[in-house]
Amino acid sequence: MSILTMREPGKRVLATGAEAFARGGLEAGIGFFATYPGTPASGVGDSIAEVHRELEGLYFEYSMNEKIATEGAIGAAWGGVRAMVAMKLAGFNVATDTLFTVTRGEVKGLVIVHGSDPGQQSSGTEQDNRFYGPFMHFPILQPSSVQEAKDFVLKAFEISERFVVPVIIDAPSALLHGSGELELGVLPEAFPATGELQPHFVKTPHDINLGRPGRHRVMLMREAEVREYVANNDLNRVVEGDADWGIITCGMAFGYTMEALNILGIENVPVLKLGMVHPLAPESVGTFMKGLKRVIIIEEGEGFLEGQIKAMAYDLRLSVPLIGKEWFSPVGMLSPSRVAVELSKGLGVPLSGQFEHLPLEFIEDTERLAGSLAFPSGGSIPMPLFEAPRRVRTFCVGCPHRPVAYGIKKATKGKHVIGTDIGCYAMMEGPPFHLGDFKICMGGGIGSAQGLSRKVQDTPVIAFIGDSTLFHAGLPSVLNAAYYDANVLLIVLDNRWTAMTGHQPTPATQETPDGEPMRHVDIAKLLRALGVKWVKEVNPFKPDKVEALVKQALKKPGFKAIVTKGECTLQKGRRDRILKVEPEVTYQIEAEKCKMCDICFADFGCPAIVLGQGEDGSDMYQIDPGLCTQCGACAHVCPFDAIVAREGQRGK
Amino acid sequence: MKHFNIIICGVGGTGVIGLGELLRKAAMLEGNRVLGTESRGSGQRGGPATASVRFTTLDENEEYNDHTTLWAGSVGAGGADLMIATEAAEALRNAHYLSEHSRVVLNTFTLKPTQTRQEIKAKSLKYPSVEEVVAMLHQLTPHVHVFNASEMSMQHFGSYRTTNPVLVGLALARDLLPLKKDTVKSLLKGVAKDALELGFQSEGGSKSNQGSS
C-alpha cells in the first residue's frame, strides 16, 4: 500500500521527500493538484498520480506546462478548494508571469512546491529562486527534513488561507530524492469534489484586473502581517548554546551544519534554524543575534538570508560581524563535509581524522567534496581519488533517438547549426554524434533558430524538439516559424513520453504501459494545422530513411518539419514484459561478413554492440543478447550487411 | 548510539537504487533511525549510479538530540562504514568515501563504456582490472572483500538480475552488514530470496580477499 493513502496516524514510515510533500498535500485535504514533470520535483506529482484514482474528489493532472498548472490551481482555489502544484526551478520561471499578479490578496489556499537544484544535477541553470520571494512578495518556507516536508505543507496552507497569498515551499533535490522517516498524520475522510466560489470573487465582479493600482499596497500590508505572524510561530527554532558566536541557517543546510558541528566536536554554539526564509521577523533574528560576537550564516544558494539579515542588523543598530558567502560559496550544493571543512578553515578548528587520507586539493575544493552524489553532467563533478574510467551519458539500447542522430549526421555531414532543446535527444550533443550547437530552455531551440535563419544564409538551420517540450513551449514558436516562413528544418523527436523526467504521459502517448489505448494528438496533423506546409513522418529505426528525408528537407526553402515516430524503448519494453510479448527475431553480427570497420560500435555507439572475441581468439564485434532490444536499427547501419536478423525478418 | 553509513555504487542497470531502498527498509524494520539518498535520472543512460544508506542504532532509553542525530542523506568524505560496489571500477570513482575503517564489498562485474573512433584508434580507454581496483583500494583500507556475485547469479539463476541479493547474502554471512538475514529476506520476493540464501550459504564466494579483514 502506498504511504500516501495509509490511514494510520502516528505510524512511522520510510519516505522520500517527494512522497512527504505529496502526503502533506493529501493530509491538507487538497481538491486539486497539477504539475508539469521536471526533475527534481517530478516525484511529488508522480506520487499523487499513482494514487489519485483511489481518492475520490481529488482532481489531478499533468498540465502542459507550469504556467497552466499554476493557473489551473488558482482557478480551483477560487472554486473554494485547497490547491497544490509542484514544479522545478526552471518551470517556476515559466509560471512567474501568472504568479506576479496573484500575490496581491486575491488567492488563498494555494501552495507551490518549488524543486530547487543546488549543484545543478538535473537543471539547465544553477539559480536561487528564493529571490522571487521579495520580488513578488510571497512567503517561502524551507523544510530541513522529510518530516518537515510534510508538516510544512500543512503550515503553508494555513498561512496561505490566513493571509490570502500563495505560499512557496522550497524543495531541493537532496530533500526530494532523499529518504527518511515520516510520522504520518491524519488523512481526511474525503477530498473536496466541489467547493464554494470565493466570496471576494463573487462580490466584486469589477475586480477582474488583478494587478490593478491599489493592490500593491494590499500586497505590502499582507507581507507585514506575515512578518508579524512568523515572529510568534514555531516555524523557526533555536538550538541552544552558550558560545559567544552563533549560526543562522535554513533548509538542508541546517542538518549539514549540525552534522558538521558534530564532526568538529563543537556542541556549545547556538543555532537559529529558520523555517520561513521570507519574510524574516526582525524580532526573532534580532533577539538571536543580540550579544553575539560573530554570526555565521550557512545557506545553500546565494546570500539570500545574508542580505536580509545584514539589512536587518543595520536597522536594529547591531554591529555584530556577519559571515556568509565569503565562507560558503553559492556554487554547488552543501554537505556536512563541505560545511565542516569551511568552518574548520574559518574558525581555525582542526578537522577530524575522517578527512586524513584525502589530498589537500580535495579538501581545498569543497564544491567537489559536496558533489558526492552528482552525476558528471551538472555543476558539481565528483573527482575521484583514483582515476576512474570516464563514462559518457548515452542513449539507452534501443532508443529511437540514436538512429535518428546517425541519419541526421550522415545527411548534414556536420554542416548545420542545430538548436536543441530539453529532453533525452539533447544527449545527441555528446559523442559520437555532436549534434546540437545551442540549448537554452524549453522551446528555446525553435525560438532562436528562427532569428538565426534570418541572418545565416549558407548553413542549414535545424531545430530539435521532443513531444512533451513541443506541447509545453514549442507550439507558439512553431506557429511563428510557419507564419513567417523561417528557413528552418524542425525535427520533432516524438517518443510519446516525457521520458527523461520519468516517463510521464504526454498528449502524444498512445498506450499505457499495460497496453490500454489512450486518447492522443497526431503531431503531424497539429503541425499542418499550424500552417507548416511540408510535414513528413519517419520511422526512426531506419536511419537510412531519416538521412534521405533530412537531405530532401534541406533542399526546400522555408519552414518544414520531420516527425520521427518511435516510442521510448524503456516504456515499450515495460509493456512487452507486462503483455509477455517475446521478440520474433534476434540480431547477430556474422563474423565472415564483418570487416571490423567500427561503424556500428563507434559511429552508431549502441551499448549492446560489444567488442568480444571470435572462436580463433581475435577481436570481433558482437551483439550482447542480454542487452539487445531487437530495434533492428544497426542492421541498416552496417555497410556490409553483416548484421542480420535470425528467425524471420521483422523490420521495425 | 551507533551510526552506520553505507555507500552503494555502480552503473545504471546494476540495481544500485533498488539495493539502497532494500537496505533502508531493512534497517528501518530492525528499529533503526534511517536516512539515505540516491543519484537520479542519468543512471539508466550508462552513467555512474550511487545510493546511500545511513542508520542509527539507539541503545535502550537513549534519546536523540540535535547534535547527535544524522540529518543528511549523503555520506561524508571518509565516512563510509561499508561500500558496496556492484561494478568494480565504480569503487574507484567513490573512493573518497573510504577510510582505513571502511569495509568494501566488491563485485567483480565490470561494464566498459562505449568508445569513439579516436579512442579505439588510440587504444586510450584505460579500464582497470579487478586486481588493479583492489590494489588501489588497499591504499585506503585493508578490508576489501571481493565476490563474483554476478557470475554466481548467472550460474544459478540464469540471469544477472539476482546479483545483488547474492551479494547481500555474501556480505551478511561475513558480518559486513549489521542487519539480520531474515529481515532482508522478508523484503524480497521469489527467486531473490533464493539468491540471498545462495550468497549467505556460499563459502567460495570470496575470490581474492587479499587484505586482512
Image: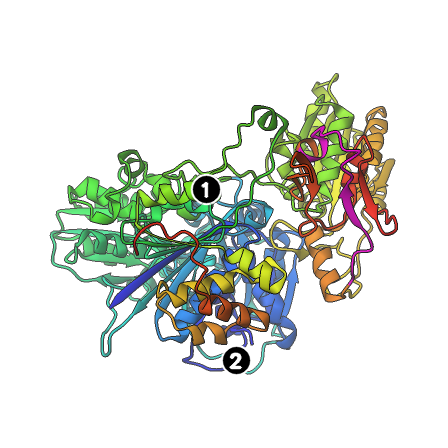
Residue A44, horizontal then vertical, whole percent? 54, 61
Q: Using the image, determine if residue A115 lies above or below residue B195.
A: above
**From the viewer's perspective, is A269 left or right of A602?**
left
Q: Dividing the image into 4 quarters, which one contains the N terminus of chain A? A: bottom right
Along the line of sight, which residue is nearer the eye, A123 or A453?
A123
Q: Residue at x 36, y 59 (%)?
A: A144
Q: Dot 1 falls on which chain?
A: A
Residue lying at 62% horizontally and 68% vertically, measured from the top left: A50
N-term mark: 2 or 1: 1
Whether the magenta-drawn stretch holds residue A68 is answered as: no
Q: Picture quarter containing residue A75?
A: bottom right
What amino acid type is highlighted by mark number 2? Pro
Residue at far top of view: A458
Q: Which residues are magenta?
A: A581-601
Q: Residues within 10 Å of mark 2 (few under 14, many from 20)?
A: few
Q: Is residue A452 left or right of residue B17?
A: right
Q: Position of residue B68 (x, y in %)?
A: 24, 63
Q: Residue B144 appears at what percent x and percent y?
A: 36, 52
Callout 1 amino acid:
Gln
Identify the disc placed on residue A380.
Answer: none
Q: Is residue A121 left or right of residue A326?
A: right
Instruction: Give the residue at mark 1.
Output: A127
Q: Position of residue A492 (x, y in %)?
A: 75, 41
Q: Which mark is residue A188?
A: 2
On screen, residue B213 above or below B140: below
